Amino acid sequence: MRPLRDEILVHNERVKLFSGFLNAVGLGLIAFALIRPLVEQGAALGWLTLWWSVAGLALHAAAHYILGMLRKEPRA
């Protein structure tokens, strides 16, 4: 059986990887929401832009929340 410290380290790395993934997807959605309409239509931003931006911000916020699930090593 692995020591408790190893289990905590593995858990923390998985949490950080998942949080980083959500953060990257969220920031990608925000970039997609803002850059695509500017390239296609000029400066016309609509409801669809707002929707994708809010979805990206929600994923970005979820990534911050998930980082709160990091574990600390118990003190002896």
Image (cartoon, rainbow, N blue to C red):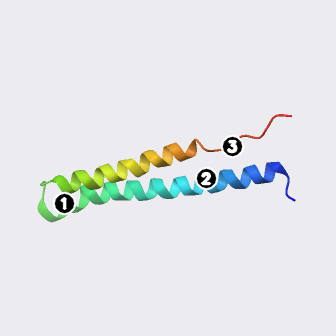
As drawn, 70 above or below 36: above
Question: x, y (%) of residue 55?
Answer: 33, 53
Quarter of the figure with residue 71? top right
What is the three-letter code of the residue carrying label 2? Val
What is the three-letter code of the residue carrying label 3? Arg
Q: Which mark is residue 37?
A: 1
| Residue placed most toward the observer, 43 or 53 | 53
Residue at (64, 44) in percent of width and height? 70
Quarter of the figure with residue 36? bottom left
Q: Earlier in the sequence, mark 2 or mark 3?
A: 2
Residue at (54, 47) in percent of width and height? 66
Q: Nearer the viewer, mark 1 or mark 3?
A: 3
As helix, strand or loop, the secondary structure at mark 3 comes to loop
Question: x, y (%) of residue 9?
Answer: 73, 51
Which residue lies under the disc numbered 3?
71
As drawn, 75 above or below 47: above
- Rounded to the nearest angstrom, the CA distance separating label 2 from label 3 is 9 Å
- Rounded to the nearest angstrom, the CA distance separating label 1 from label 2 is 34 Å
As drawn, 27 above or below 40: above
**Badge 1: residue crowd in 10 Å (few <14, some 14–19, many ≥20):** some
Which residue lies under the disc numbered 2?
15
- Locate the C terminus by quadrant: top right
The residue sitting at the front extreme is 1
Residue at (79, 53) in percent of width and height? 6
- Locate the N terminus by quadrant: bottom right
Question: x, y (%) of residue 11?
Answer: 69, 53
Residue at (61, 52) in percent of width and height? 15
